Amino acid sequence: MAKVIFIESSNAEHCVEAEPGRTLMQIAVDNMVPGIYGECGGACSCATCHVYVDPEWQARLPARSSDEAFMLEGAQEPNEHSRLCCQVKMYEELDGLVLRIPLSQG
Amino acid sequence: MSSAREIAVIVGAGHAGAEVVAALRQNAYAGRIILIGDEAELPYRRPPLSKNYLSGEASRESLLIRSAAAYDKLEVECWIGTQVLAIDRVKKNILLSDGRIQAYTKLVLATGGRPRKLPDPAADKSNVHYIRTLADIDRLQSGFAKGKHLLVIGGGYIGLEAASVGIKNGLQVTVLEAAPRVLARVAAPEISAFYERAHRTRGVDVRTGISVQAFHGEQQVEAVQLSDGSELQVDLVIVGIGIVPNDELARSAGLEVNNGIVVDTFARTRDSDILAVGDCANHVNGFLTRLIRIESVPSAQEQGRTAAHSICGKDIPHVAVPWFWSDQFDLKLQMVGLSQGYDRLVLRGDLASESFSAFYLRNGIVLSVDAVNRPQDFMVAKRMVAERVQVDPQALADESISLKSLLPAA
Ligand SMILES: Cc1cc2nc3c(=O)[nH]c(=O)nc-3n(C[C@H](O)[C@H](O)[C@H](O)COP(=O)(O)OP(=O)(O)OC[C@H]3O[C@@H](n4cnc5c(N)ncnc54)[C@H](O)[C@@H]3O)c2cc1C
Ligand code: FES
């Protein structure tokens, strides 16, 4: 199965199986990746699923909605690689995707 | 350190219970973990029940908090469809609905709440519904059809969300609220008025200060008599008048119960081997520094983590700022903090544009914020409430000044 790699701010890596069709937040929660809480369950209301997408992968992800962009604006330490990973669904071509977890969610 | 011989039993497989079991393993709990729930499902998300699951947009599968495989990987035993009937605190075991007795080292009560029922037995009919579980929605969905007249009793979040889905799905909707305004317990009069208007302009017949006097009909409720003497024909009734905490197990076991199971800021009852979390727990919130029972997912999860820490011997107090969200029509509402005791309401943005934030201040300090279609404000608002920021009301209302600039420099 396809894999996704979550990297904590401490550099601890979590390489997890990623079922296509599930969101990256659900995949993180299924695999108990620390720092991804998904409090609102994907309603784009909490930003507890904030990640930085590895630059080389960025172009392959669908664009942010305006709600997501606005939520990220107010998030802690946002940058141009920021995503709310509940808004992105896994698909085969994202096999190997690398996502970093912000320090504030450490 | 926990030993492999320990057994943590969690009663209630909802939002809080699901978080406890995961947080226990994240904190290297080495013992056996048993999650017991009386519903037919693994833990699932309840908020969509009155939102995109009711409307038919979200799949049943997408509601699961974790997949079944995830619990296997966590080595958590899920005993689904099993009810806990009693606790024996002396022998440290529980009695299950299938007659078995299970020992525990630590017991976490995460039993949630059940909908408050209408007292009138005439309302006990097959087309009168409450929304708490997936089974409730399964029972409701066939009648929730285009053209039907839906009566919603109770103008709280769940009632208003159900009303908005009703309109979306082509039903004719009436909302009755006994108080003079909707959301009366949680929002300022200005915000209540905004929501009443928003619902009316989208086709909901919102009536406040009015209640049902009588339910008519044999097998089903066909009409209701209202307190102003008028009568309404109905096909379907949804009741959303609050919940009652499931605290009976704790009460029978002699634990302190008062509007929920009373616990300290570490989620512990006075029996140090029994903890309580989520909707059923009247807990000490370290941020508010008082006992409070909160009905929200973020709070259930935070408390779940607090309990797991306590069990693992790391006493980390529960200090989270309460927050909540509600989706109605195209209105995205996000709320943080508690507004009780506010002396001034400051609006940023325009009510008429349906994109604004309402700041509740006391002595200039931000107590709470309701953000409507303002996710960019909400994230900053959360920090303002958590840090008890004092703000200049004029600056707050001035949209040319960035909200972030009103936060104290880090
Ligand atoms: C329709 C709806 C919409 C909501 N929308 C939002 C929202 O938008 N945002 C938000 O933050 N919150 C929302 N909430 C509130 C949120 O769902 C609750 O706060 C949350 O579910 C609380 O989690 P809990 O684990 O304490 O209780 P629950 O999720 O209720 O879980 C408790 C479980 O324990 C089981 N149980 C009880 N007694 C026993 C027993 N003796 N033996 C075995 N099992 C038992 C119950 O059947 C239940 O399955 C909503 C709730 C509803 C009903
Ligand atoms: S889970 Fe809440 S915004 Fe992603």
Image: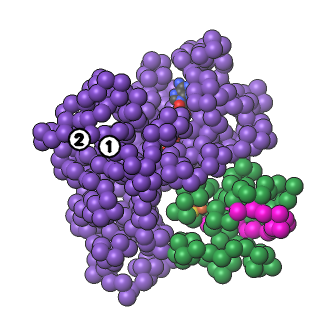
Chain colours: A green, B purple
User: Which of pointers 2 and 1 lies earlier in the amino acid sequence?
Assistant: 1
- The answer to which of B249 and B51 lies nearer the viewer is B51
Looking at the image, which is closer to me, B297 or B67? B67
Residue B151's disc is 1
Q: Position of residue B47 (x, y in %)?
A: 50, 49
Q: Is residue A95 magenta?
A: yes
Q: Quadrant of the N terminus of chain B?
A: top right
Q: Residue at x 66, y 46 (%)?
A: B61
Q: Residue at image x 55%, y 64%? A: A44
Q: Are marks 2 and 1 on the same chain?
A: yes
Q: On the rendering, which quadrant does ligand 2 occupy?
A: bottom right
Observer-nearest residue: B216 or A43? B216
Tell me where residue B297 appears, x and y as whole percent.
Answer: 51, 48
Q: Nearer the viewer, mark 2 or mark 1?
A: 2
Q: Residue furthest left?
A: B229
Q: Which residue is mark 2?
A: B232
* Secondary structure of the residue carrying numbered label 1: strand
Direction from residue B145 to residue B239 in the image, left or right: left
The answer to which quarter of the image holds residue B119 is top left
* Callout 2 amino acid: Leu
Query: What is the magenta range?
Result: A89-106
Magenta stretch contains residue B231:
no
Q: Are marks 2 and 1 in contact (CB under 8 Å)?
A: yes
| Marker disc for residue B213 | none
Helix, strand or loop at label 2? It is strand
* x 40%, y 41%: residue: B293
Q: Position of residue B404 (x, y in %)?
A: 46, 79
Q: Is residue B65 visible?
A: no
Mark 2 chain: B
Residue type at mark 1: give it: Leu
